[in-house]
Amino acid sequence: MSLEALTIGRVGVDLYPEQSGVPLAGVSTFAKSLGGTATNVAVAAARLGRRTAVLTKVGPDGFGDYVRQALDGFGVSPEFVGTSPDLQTPVVFCELNPPADPPLLFYRSPIAPDLTLTDEDVPWDVVESVPLLWVTGTGVSVEPARATQRKILEARGRREHTVLDLDYRPMFWPSVEQARAEIGGLLDHVTVAVGNRTEAEVAVGTADPDEAADRMLARGLRLAVIKKGAEGVLVATPDGRWTVPPQRVEVVCGLGAGDGFGGALIHGLLSGWDPVRIAEYANAAGALVASRLACADAMPTAGEIEELL
Ligand SMILES: Nc1ncnc2c1ncn2[C@@H]1O[C@H](COP(=O)(O)OP(=O)(O)OP(=O)(O)O)[C@@H](O)[C@H]1O
Ligand SMILES: O=C(O)C[C@@H](O)[C@H](O)C(=O)CO
């Protein structure tokens, strides 16, 4: 059966503390799970019944084996997971302090395999024809991934649905100005953009959700999704705009909520739902992930989302 969505970007092994509310120095045990935003999004959409794959790379090590096995276990095709012979599969620690907004510690030196993506790694027929293509801001943070991701979007030709996860992680960029130039430049090649207020400010120079949405729509997007935290989500199209309130949950770990939201966004776009229905569904998915420790391993099923709604 053919693929419905291809995500492109980060993969890693998340090592998250099993003790909450303490600095890393006080943690005694860590739980291992699959992570990396593009990977989490592919898993989240697969949990909702979509046939997905992630285009990424790992190192020739045991963690790379784990990534492929975990993807397979979640029903995400590992077919487009390449191997960088001289690099290590990244690991990522977080500090559950505060649990709602945990600081991240990335081990991706000297460069992460997923940022060494070149033309040879790309399944060109798939990126041109898959019903939904998902790219991320981090994918243009360094070469050679930057040039490769740009070429992918050119080949795609702004076909519907091409989604940009604004995904700004400051530690991957030399300056916010460069991030703005690179991530902002992608807006002319996608049909949907999604990000929080900080990410919107990086991409289009304003953290005001309405103004950010206006600037994105002016670039030819069909849907702009601005996540406003506790105030909910703004969804804007050329025909109207709506703010959809969040679901209330007790937060265990805020990380990955955006990726759960993203997987549900994929499901909603492929289902042809209207923007408000998509946002309600995605808010519930994000809330469920925030109420759990892990990222990929915590993605909710359709049944769990419907129960919360
Ligand atoms: N504490 C929470 N309570 C309820 N819903 C939440 C909570 N945190 C996140 N969500 C839901 O998940 C969505 C995405 O979360 P968030 O805005 O934190 O994404 P993000 O900044 O992209 O995070 P990350 O990249 O770490 O996953 C929110 O718009 C909201 O719908
Ligand atoms: O890759 C990251 O951003 C950090 C990971 O630990 C986590 O899996 C994630 O992607 C949260 O968005």
Image (cartoon, rainbow, N blue to C red):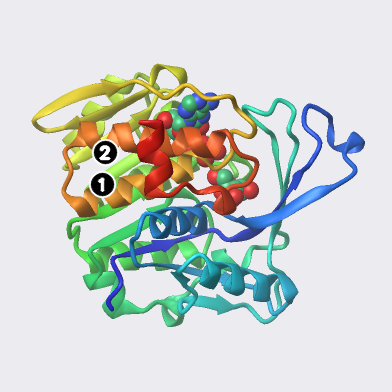
Q: Secondary structure at mark 2?
A: helix
Q: Residue at x 49, y 65 (%)?
A: 145
Q: Quadrant of the N terminus?
A: bottom left
Instruction: Give the numbered dot on residue 149.
Output: none
Which three-letter amino acid code belongs to the residue tagged 2?
Ile
Which three-letter amino acid code belongs to the residue tagged 1?
Gly
In the rendered structure, the answer to whether residue 195 lies left or right of residue 191 reads right
Q: CA separation, marks 2 and 1?
A: 5 Å
Q: Position of residue 231 (x, y in %)?
A: 40, 17
Between 120 and 226, the residue placed more toward the observer is 226
Instruction: Give the numbered dot on residue 278.
Output: 2
Mark 1 close to ligand 1, CB under 8 Å: no
Q: Position of residue 303 (x, y in %)?
A: 39, 46
Residue 214 appears in the picture as rendered: yes
Instruction: Determine which residue is flagged by label 1.
Output: 268
Between 191 and 188, the residue placed more toward the observer is 191
Residue 165 appears in the picture as rendered: no
Between 302 and 53, the residue placed more toward the observer is 302
Q: Position of residue 147 (x, y in %)?
A: 42, 65
Q: Quadrant of residue 146?
A: bottom left
Q: Position of residue 288 (x, y in %)?
A: 50, 36
Q: Quadrant of the C terminus?
A: top left
